[in-house]
Image (tube, rainbow, N blue to C red):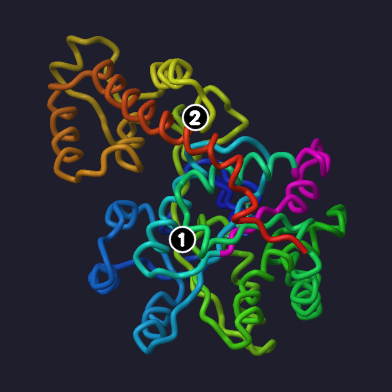
Amino acid sequence: MVEDGSFTVTPWEVSGEIDYDLLVEKFGTKRIDQALIDRMAKYGPIHPLMRRGVVYSHRDMDWILDRYDAGEPFYLYTGRGPSGQTHLGHLMPWLFTKHLQDVFNVPLYFQLTDDEKFLFNEGLTLDDTRGMAYQNLLDVIALGFDPGKTKIFLDTEYIHNLYPFALQVAKKVTFSTAKAVFGFDNSTNIGSIFYTSIQTAPAFLGSALAGKNVPCLIPCGIDQDPHFRVTRDIAPSLGYYKPALLHNKMFPGLGGGDKMSSSQPNSTIYTTDAPKVVRKKINTAFTGGAVTVDEQRKSGGKPEICAVFKYKFYLFEPEDRKLDELYDRCRKGEVLCGECKKTLGDAVACFLEKHQEAREKAKDRVDEFILRD
Ligand code: TRP
C-alpha cells in the first residue's frame, strides 16, 4: 500500500496524481528496460502498450523467459473484480494479456472475484457481484481469447477447487502481514482479511492441475502488486514457483484524472455505451487546448495533459509515427481539439461497434470458457 499525501494506491483504491516511479521504488519491482523489450521482441511483436511504457514494470520476467527458452512454458493468470460494468480501462490489460497469449501460445486462467467485490463494497450484494461477473465475462470473451486455452471462473462457483490452495496460503499469512501490506485495521471485516489467499490461489492452480510446477505470469495493474507480493513470499514454502508479474499503469479518465473510474460515469466509456453517448462523453473531455481558437493557433496545445491525446496514446492510435506527428502538430497549434475529439470519437465508436457485436455473440459461448466446481 502506498499513500503519499498526493496519491493513494492500494488494491481497492487508486486516487490522486500517481507517481509511477515511486511505486516501483516502494513496491520494489523492476522497471521494464530496453534490454527486456529487445529480448521480448524475439518472440513476437512488442505490444504498443509495452513499447510506450504503459506496461512499465515487472517481477521476474527474465526468469519466466529463461524457463520458456528451456522448454518450460508458463501459463497466464489475470482477473477482474466485478463491481460494475466493464469500461475501456478494464479492457486495456486484457488486450495486452490476449497479445501475450497469442505470442506465447499459452493457457490463461481468468478469475472473477465476486467474493472480493461483495466483501469490500458496502452497497453490493452477492447477487449483484455475480450478475456483474457474468456481464464482465462477455467482454473478456468478446476480445477473442482462444476457448481451448482460456478458462474463466467466478470465485463462488469454483471455490471447491480454489479453497485447498487458499487454506494453504491463509495459514502462512499473519494478520500483522495483512495489516502492513493492505492497511487493514480492527474494523476490517474478517472476509476481507482472508481474501488475499483467494486471489493467490490461481497462481498455484495451474501447477496443481498440470501435476507439476508450471511457471505463472500475471499481467495486472500495479495496484494489484501487494497481493502478489504476499503470493511470492509464501510460494517457495508451499513448494511452488513465485509467479512473475507484468504491471501496467492505470488507464486515464476522460476528465483528466489518472484513472478511469466508474464513480465518474461521464468521464468513463463503458463497453456497452452507444456511439452517440461515446461521442458526447469525448466532446466534454478534458483537453490540453487553449481557451480560444486564436490563442491555440498561436501558442499551441498541451498534449501531455490532454485526455484525448492520452486515449490515442493508450489504445486508439497504434502507429507511433502518427502519434508523434499528432503530438507535434498539437504543440504547434496546427490541430485543434474539435478535430482531435472527432477522430478519437470515430476510433472508439468503430472499436465498440465491433466489440458489441462480439459481446452479443459471446452470450452463447459462455460454456466454452467457464470453469465450475
Ligand atoms: N482484485 C482484482 C480487481 O479488483 C481482480 C483480480 C483477481 C486480478 N485476480 C487478479 C487482477 C489477477 C489482476 C490479476 O480488479
Residues in magenta, as a range: 109-130
46 left or right of 129 in image: left
Mark in the foreground, 2 or 1: 2
Q: Disc 2 marks which residue?
A: 269
- Above or below, 160 against 339 in this view is below
Query: Who is closer to the viewer here, 181 or 131?
Result: 131
Q: Secondary structure at mark 1?
A: strand
Residue 282 appears in which quarter of the rendering?
top left
Quarter that holds the N terminus? bottom right
- Above or below, 328 against 216 in this view is above
Residue at image point 87% right, 52% down? 187
3D distance between C-alphas at marks 2 and 1: 22 Å
Q: Image quadrant of ligand 1?
A: bottom right
Inspect the image, locate mark 1, and give the three-letter code of the amino acid beneath it. Answer: His
Residue 82 appears in which quarter of the rendering?
top right
21 left or right of 169 in image: left
Q: Disc 1 marks which residue?
A: 247
Coordinates of residue 18 in the picture (x, y in percent): 47, 47
- Characterize the local packing of mark 1: few (<14), some (14-19) or many (20 or more) Cα atoms within 10 angstroms: many
